[in-house]
Image (tube, rainbow, N blue to C red):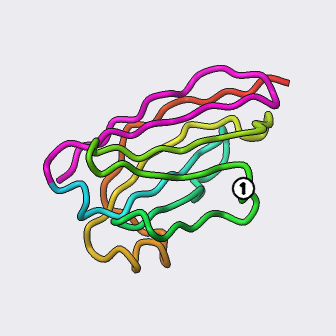
Amino acid sequence: QVQLVESGGGLVQAGGSLRLSCAASGRTFRKYAMGWFRQAPGKEREFVAAISRSGGSTVYVDSLKGRFTISRDNAKNTVYLQMNSLKPEDTAVYYCAADDLNSDYALRTKIFSSWGQGTQVTVSS
């Protein structure tokens, strides 16, 4: 089981940017499709973005395309989420997720088996 630790969250003004990082343990990071999800207060967890094992394929929730970018560095066992033009409605706990069953399956279904503890992002107006 891969261990995931998110970092980079914090308080930012509307219009600002943040880059979240998720560091994964172990030597098999490149075998995992990776994803980011978020959960706002009083709402269900929602999918944000995912990236294939090689980084060659990415998927995003339509509402965030153009503002958020997912990337990975397999040499550093890390996946990133660059968030630009942040809005108060982006306030949420952001979770990193991983799955090693099948990269295409995870990107299509948004089903992941391993989760981090989350990092808080707060966007002030």
On the image, the x and y values in percent for residue 100 come to 26, 67
Indicate the secondary structure of the residue bearing disc 1.
helix
Q: Name, please, the residue furthest toward the left.
A: 27
Q: Name, please, the residue furthest toward the right.
A: 125
Tell me if residue 18 is in the magenta stretch.
yes
- 15 or 6: nearer the viewer: 15
| Identity of the residue drawn at 44% across and 29% down | 7
From what the image shows, is residue 121 above or below residue 12?
below
Q: How many labels does the image show?
A: 1
- 74 or 116: nearer the viewer: 74
The 10 Å Cα crowd at callout 1, few under 14, some 14 to 19, many 20 or more, is some
Please provide the residue range marked out in magenta.
Answer: 1-27
| Identity of the residue drawn at 41% across and 51% down | 72
On the image, the x and y values in percent for residue 1 come to 17, 53
From what the image shows, is residue 3 above or below residue 9?
below
Q: Is residue 41 left or right of residue 53?
A: right
| Identity of the residue drawn at 48% across and 76% down | 109
Q: Quadrant of residue 39?
A: top right
The residue to which callout 1 is attached is: 64
